[in-house]
Image: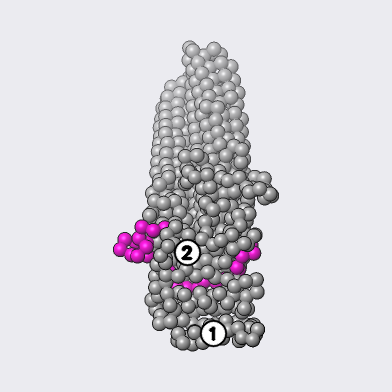
Amino acid sequence: MKLNRLVIALILGLFIGSGTYVNAHAEGNYDITFTTADYNSGYALQQYLDYQKGPTPKYDMLTITLAPGEYSFDACLCVYSNTTIKATGATIYYTRRAGNSDGKNPVIFNDAEGAYGYDGASNITIDGGIWDLQGQPGQAMYGKRLEGIRFMHCKNITVKNLTIQNMYTTHMLTIEGVDGATVSNCSFKHQYMINQKKEAVHIDSMHNYGMAPSSQNNIKYDDTFTNNLVVDSCTFEDVPRGIGTHIAVEGCYPNNITITNNKFYDITYEAIKAYCYKNYIIKNNYMDLCGIGIKAYNYVPADETDGTADDEKPYQKPNDGVIREKNPSSFNGVIEKNTIVNATKSSGFGIHLQGCSSRPYRGVSVCDNIISKSGKIGIYTKNCEDIIIEKNNISDSLGMGIDVGYSKDCDVFNNTINKAKALGVCVKNGSGNIIRDNTITTTTKQNIYAISCSNVTIDSNDVTSGKKGGIGIDKGCKGAKITNNKVKSAGKNGISISEISSGTVKGNTVTSPKNFGMYFFKTTSVNVTGNTVKNAKKSGIVVHKTNKTNIKKNKIEKTGQYGILFSGTRKSYAYSNTIKKEKSYKVLYANSCKNRKKNIK
């Protein structure tokens, strides 16, 4: 389109004569193409975009196409309903016009003035183009805050096939109070202020100016949150955060969020930050060299906040009159089939789930993920309930494989953990958690460890080469059940139980521990039945300073010292055990035992 044609069209469209409004395109679709010769720094595009302004857009659909080439914009574009901008093959360099120095003028934003709920300008598509925000050293916007594209108070948004790059700081794409948005096949890369905690794709609520700033007039803050969002097949590279949210409003939960098939490289903090999302799916994403792969949560500790101003604090009270929802009985989240490698840049978690004691984080499944070389913990839960951690493959963790902390009724099963430089699975300060059917090999500490737990179940796990032991149950545990596990080549004791008040150890097989097969210290009311211990380098079972800990119907074969040793015990006995090939006594009660019985040689 030539410039003179544009001028003629504008004159026809705006001419008022004898009380008659001339409109040659009152209905249907309208397509117009601009070239590098006639776009007028973006102002010519805005004149056509304005045709859709108001409650009744002029066209059923206005499509503006930028022909291939390089464009320099200093005009931000305000987009109205039923509009498509196509820019395949075009590169747009955006330099904010003079006077707009507060970072609130993105290159594209929808009209949201005076809108409540999802009633702002809607049905908008941005397709293609390289949108360069010129924030790198030597570029025009270096050192200045600048958003890329922003949508708020609207519905039915599509952003596809484009690249946003070279930002100095803040968000590349912001989605605030939107119902129905799809972001697909896009690339977000290269933010200079890499330590500023800003998401490339930012998902938020319309709560206040701090959360949803805008240069538009009369923006309504009514706590509208985002629903029905899909981010699929996008690439994120060299940005502080990939996708997510860092401020939530009490009782307002972004709903139906789907994040699939994306790739993340060299992310300073979280690749995905799902704060207070409900009914969400995070699936088939690939993450390499991220501080945290996936963080899904409904609580932020005080020492992890991003901002200090009141309107930027991570958990906000809702605005007056807003109906809020209680903490969900289930957030209904699925974190599945993601690959996370080298999560070592910051906290170093592969997957991190977190709530707090007053708002437990509930009802999430973490399944079939591959996590390799996490700097701290492969999968970590804190203050969670009813979490399923299933069929994950975790290797080469620089800390623990799986840590279930302060959590309740979580099921950890069928996971494979190899080469953790601490514990394989740790369960602490919780209740009703189940660790079952996992395969754990080569850990620097115990393969499985529990402390300060009630009613923990450790069942049918296959653990090998725990340098400091196979399975350890420590102080403060009550009602522990350790059953049907296979423990091989423990660096110290196969199974160690210390200072617990009740429990069952039944049906386990311990082979070739370098110290004792089983060790019980200061335990009370523990029944040890039907276990097998083979090739213990020292004694098969050692019972020290216990009360009412009974050893019954166990099989012990080939020990370097005793079959069963009692020391300093009260009301603790051995019954009907089968002991073969012990080097010294089959059963020995030391002089310190209060219940000393006959030693058996």
Marker disc for residue 67: none
Which element type, helix, strand or loop, lies under badge 1? Answer: helix
* Residue 571 x/y as whole percent: 58, 17
- Which color scheme is applied? one colour
The image shows residue 314 at horizontal and vertical percentages of 53, 46
Asked if the residues shown at circle 1 and circle 2 are in contact, with their CB atoms under 8 angstroms apart, the answer is: no
53 or 301: nearer the viewer? 53
Report the amino acid beneath label 1. Answer: Ile
The residue under label 2 is which amino acid type? Pro
Q: Main secondary structure of the magenta part?
A: loop
Q: Residue at x 47, y 46 (%)?
A: 307
Residue 52, relative to residue 252: is it above or below? below
> Image height check: is 300 above or below 371?
above
The residue segment tinted magenta is 118-145
- Residue at far front of view: 18
Q: Does the magenta stretch include residue 518?
A: no
Which is closer to the viewer, label 1 or label 2?
1
Question: Which SS class for mark 2?
Answer: loop
Q: In this view, does 322 lie above or below 3?
A: above
Res 455 quadrant in image: top right
Residue 11, disc: 1
Q: Which residue is drawn at 56% across and 36% down?
A: 406
Residue highlighted by disc 2? 106
Q: Position of residue 391 (x, y in %)?
A: 53, 51
Could you tell me if residue 169 is visible in this image?
yes
Q: Residue 125 in magenta?
A: yes
* Residue 133 can be seen, yes or no: no
